Amino acid sequence: MNKVIIFSAPSGSGKTTLVKYCLDTFPQLQFSISCTTRDLRGTEVHGVDYHFISPDKFREKIGEDAFVEFEEVYDNKYYGTLKSEVERIWKGGKVVIFDVDVKGGISLKKYFGDQALSVFIMPPSVAELELRLIARGTDDLETIKTRVHKAAHEMAFKDEFDEIVVNNDLDHAKFAISKIVQNFLKS
C-alpha cells in the first residue's frame, strides 16, 4: 500500500525541522514539494523548498484539477499539493512526507484516509510561538501578528490529527516523532 505522512502545525512550531529530521532518519521517506504563490524567504530555492508560481498559474492548475489539496491561506497566497508530485514519489517506491499548514493537513488526511499518518506539531504556547517567529527574522511584525492570531485558531484543530506532539524540547519531540513514524512504517 502506498503511504503518506502528514506534518501540520502553526507557523513557527518547528514542523519543518522535524520533517527534515525524519528525512535524515528514515531513508524510505521522500519530501513532497508543495506549490505556493508566496515569495521566497531567506535561502529557499524554487523546486527544492517549494514550486513558486504566480497566483494566475496556480488558479489555472486548480481549473485543471491538478491538486490533491489546496488552500488560499492568506489573500492571494495559495499553497497546494500536486497529484503529479505524489505519483512521482510513489513510483520511486518511497513514502510521501508532507509539510503543510493545518487546513492542508486535514484535507490530505481526508483524501488519503488509512494510507495516511497525520501528525500535529504543537508549540509550547502562543507566546513562545511569537518569540520563535520574531527570532526567525523572515517576516515583518505585521505578518508575525497575523501568523500568531492564525496559530491560536489552528491549535483548535489538533484533535483532527492522528498524533499530537508538543515541541517544547526538540530532542524530546524528535524521539516521539521517531517512534510514531517507525510504528506507521511497520504497519
Image: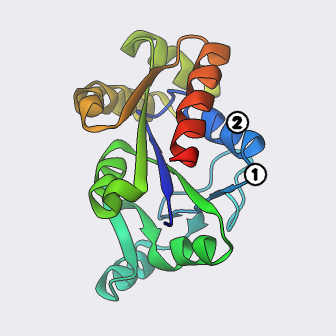
Lateral position of residue 52 relative to residue 101, left or right: right
Residue 110 placement (x, y as % from top left): 26, 57
Of the two numbered discs 2 and 1 in the rendering, the one whose residue sits closer to the viewer: 1
Q: Residue at x 58, y 61 (%)?
A: 32
For disc 1, the marked residue is 27
Q: Residues within 10 Å of mark 1 (few under 14, many from 20)?
A: few
Lateral position of residue 27 relative to residue 98, left or right: right
Q: Is residue 73 visible?
A: no
For disc 2, the marked residue is 21
Residue 172 placement (x, y as % from top left): 61, 14
Which circle's residue, 2 or 1, is located before the other in the chain?
2
Q: Amino acid at mark 2?
A: Tyr
Q: Describe the colour scheme in one phrase.
A: rainbow
Q: Helix, strand, or loop for circle 1?
A: loop
Q: Nearer the viewer, residue 53 or 21?
A: 21
Residue 12 placement (x, y as % from top left): 51, 29
Lateral position of residue 108 relative to residue 2, left or right: left
Q: CA distance from mark 2 to mark 1?
A: 11 Å
Q: Helix, strand, or loop for circle 2?
A: helix
